[in-house]
Amino acid sequence: MTPDQTRAAEILQSHRESIDRLDSILVYTLGERFKHTQAVGELKALHDLPASDPAREATQIARLEELAGKADLDPVFAKKFLNFVISEVIRHHENTKNNK
Amino acid sequence: MTPDQTRAAEILQSHRESIDRLDSILVYTLGERFKHTQAVGELKALHDLPASDPAREATQIARLEELAGKADLDPVFAKKFLNFVISEVIRHHENTKNNK
């Protein structure tokens, strides 16, 4: 490797270490988030409320898009991300409901 | 509303406030993560490295599955989540490469 390539490999490695630490935050935060949505799902199942709540979802998406702007995250990606997480939550809620 | 329903609504609200706070963590952490992957993308474009790196991705997926176990997060979801984020990163890298 040329000195230039060695330096590039070091920089790449340092970014990857940061990415790994950030991924740990994401996994633990998602774990915590699902504990709350699980509790919500149980409440909804107990009180026969629908698994999905479009009004709440619309508020969340609007809020996330605003936050994304502040965090310099692509708002389109933030919306796709929330939809991805919400689909998983709805899948869990439906399972909770079916296992009542 | 019956007292029971009022109590359920209060608990639901409290969970939603936690979920909103956790979503803020997720958005800011993803924002930070994309800053690093953007820097990686620029390095890769500069040194003509391929946008995707299957060996690195396999290591990340194995690591995330292990972390997911510790965080009591469904490992299948953790893997789907990482793939979702990585697809977005590859899309960014390809744009960086094409805009060179």
Image: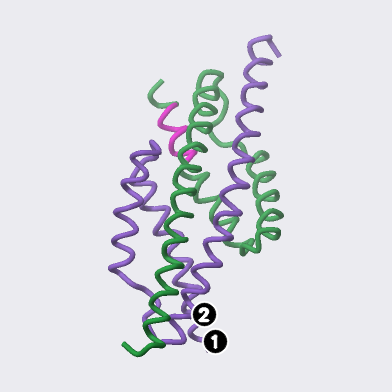
Chain colours: A purple, B green
CA gap, disc 1 and disc 2: 6 Å
Q: Residues within 10 Å of mark 1 (few under 14, many from 20)?
A: few
Residue position for label 1: A99
Apparent side of residue A44 relative to residue A7 in the rendered image (left or right): left
Give coordinates of residue A63: x percent, y percent: 32, 53
Q: Looking at the picture, does residue B73 appear above or below residue A64?
A: below
The location of residue B28, given as percent across then percent down, is 46, 42
- Furthest residue toward front: B3
| Callout 1–callout 2 Cβ contact below 8 Å | yes
Residue B47 placement, left or right of A84: right
Q: Residues within 10 Å of mark 2 (few under 14, many from 20)?
A: some
Q: Which residue is mark 2?
A: A95
* x and y percentages locating residue A92 in the rendered image: 51, 73
Same chain assignment for discs 1 and 2: yes
Could you tell me what secondary structure mostly forms the magenta stretch? helix
Give, as a single range, the part of the protein colored magenta: B89-96
Please give the name of the residue rendered at 38% of the width and 53% of the height, measured from the top-left corner.
A80
B65 or B67, which is in the foreground? B67
Q: Is residue A54 above or below residue B97?
A: below
Identity of the amino acid at label 1? Asn
Q: Residue at x 52, y 33 (%)?
A: B37
